[in-house]
Image (spheres, rainbow, N blue to C red):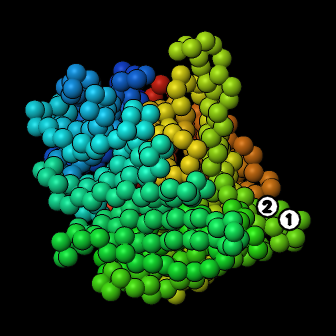
Amino acid sequence: MIKKLMCLSMMLSLSWMVNSQTIGPITITHGQEIEADKEKIVRIAGEANGKIYTLASKKDNFYIKVFNSEDMSLISTNEIEMKDFKDKEPEFEEIAVIDGRIYILGSVYDKKEKVANLLAVEISEDGKLTDNAKKLFSTKVTKNRERGAFYIKESPNLDRLLILHAALFDKEEVIQYEIKLVNNNLDIMAEYLEKVPFNDRRDLEFDIADFDVNFNDDFFIVINESFRDKKTKTNHEKFQLHAFKAANGYQKEVTDIAFTDKEIINCEMLAGDDGRVRLVGFYSSVRKSGKANKELKGVYASVVDVNSNSVEQLKFNEFDYETKVKLIGERRAKKGKDVKPLYVTHSLVQKSDGGLILLSEYQQIVVGRSSGIGPLAFTPVTHINNEIIVTSINPDGTVGWSNVIPKKQKAAYTTMSIGFAAFSGNSNFTVSAGVSVPVAVLGKGPEYLSAMPVYENGKLTVIFNDNTKNYGVTDIEEIKWLGNYNKAVPTAMTFDDNGEITRLDQEDVQKQQLVLRPRVFFRKTDKEYIIYSSRKSQDKLGRMSVN
């Protein structure tokens, strides 16, 4: 009897060790194993009604998986089959939890009417589609090839959706974008449509850099327009914040952010609850000929007062020498070379002192040569996510410190289609605000890459999967590749007030320990996250907490 009790105690202890992981201030615990898990979770939508709602995929099909909040056991799995609209089944776009109500969004192109439609259907508590459906968009376009794409963001209160549709009409030489604010009943609270002509400006570069909504239901769009006048050899940069405020009946208000001899490369916006919008990103220098260098010179920071529509702050900060050495090497840094534009905004964190922390990750997607014939052709795709530039910006817009998280990650898969939204024609129209890994790609490997930043008690911690050979290594030149993510282990790096890195490696790694998927999580609070972890055929939901 004593032996049986000891055996049971050892089994429970081993089970707790496998299901619980500690990395510095981070504790990860997992729920029950998801049995018969052929559908892989690609999005954790949120938690409501004592349940966790997730989106899963299997080949070309999508499913709603519902879990119990307490033990994270699977309650139900339901395939998403939206009713036909105009005799066509909608293509899945997104899942969202708005004020405790779950919705599925799907798009349909009406070939006869040349209209891009977006539909929303409510999901019941048990994960099934209901009859509560509504059409949110019916946007006139020119043809199927120019039907554009939809981009969706949730409000900070998680009770609104801000939806953007953008398209390029090449023959008409027009860029069109439409934005709508939707409440939890799927009512349209505000909408705006803009058409931007680019006649005789074929080299115009137009970017919808970002869009966001604040706690007051005001929403904003950042527009970056660049045009080089060949005759005068000058670069004309139009960098604007378009504000649509509830108090003013959602009338468009424009704030020009003026500067010279520089070009904005990208922008990340934070619409705060203090009546200010903060904009940060990379910029490049401009040559005497008026051409932008396109390489990264440094980081800019701007603050716009929403009430007066005035620019309170605009600072341009060049990369310091130490950061450039880590990114491009000592020889090139000494020659004053700039950084290659291969870094995308990973996340933006507001510090307790009112400043910001910008995380920018090296990202490449390498598409190989297809093999096969016609519709049976297969294309190899490799995702590469390497080092992260971490920039701490003071409240006055200057850089307090910067450092680089050293990592090398890649994941490869083969697909019959790439799955990235694109615009036809040869113009330079982009929607940087919508750059992300599509849900159709998650579940094939890229979800194990990248990182999760956690900011709590004035301290930044960044968690990511790494090769065990990198234990204790912080020198970017010594980092080994993480190629086989099934053998990865989670690690973390913390930053002190001066930006110095402390690496935190897990000491008690178990042989069958689950591997975190940093691109699949839901941030419940500053201290609690719902996560998804796997190892080969074993899958579990879990909770990550900050001590």
32 left or right of 234 in image: left
Residue visible at 75% across and 51% down in the picture: 479
Q: Looking at the picture, how far across and down is residue 20, in whole percent? A: 44, 46
Question: CA gap, disc 2 to disc 1?
Answer: 6 Å
Q: Decide: is 252 above or below 123.
A: below
When asked about the image quadrant of residue 201, the answer is bottom right
- Rendered residue at 53%/31% (across/down): 418
Residue 348 appears at what percent x and percent y? 48, 66
* Residue 459 visible: no
Q: In this view, does 271 lie to the left or right of 316?
A: left
Q: Where is residue 119 in the image (x, y as percent from the top left)?
A: 22, 38
Q: Position of residue 243 (x, y in %)?
A: 32, 72
Tell me if label 2 and label 1 are in contact, CB under 8 Å. Answer: yes
Secondary element at tag 2: helix
In-front residue for pair 202/266? 202
Q: Residue at x 36, y 32 (%)?
A: 56
Query: Which of these two is toward me, 319 or 307?
Result: 307
Which label number is shown at residue 332? 1
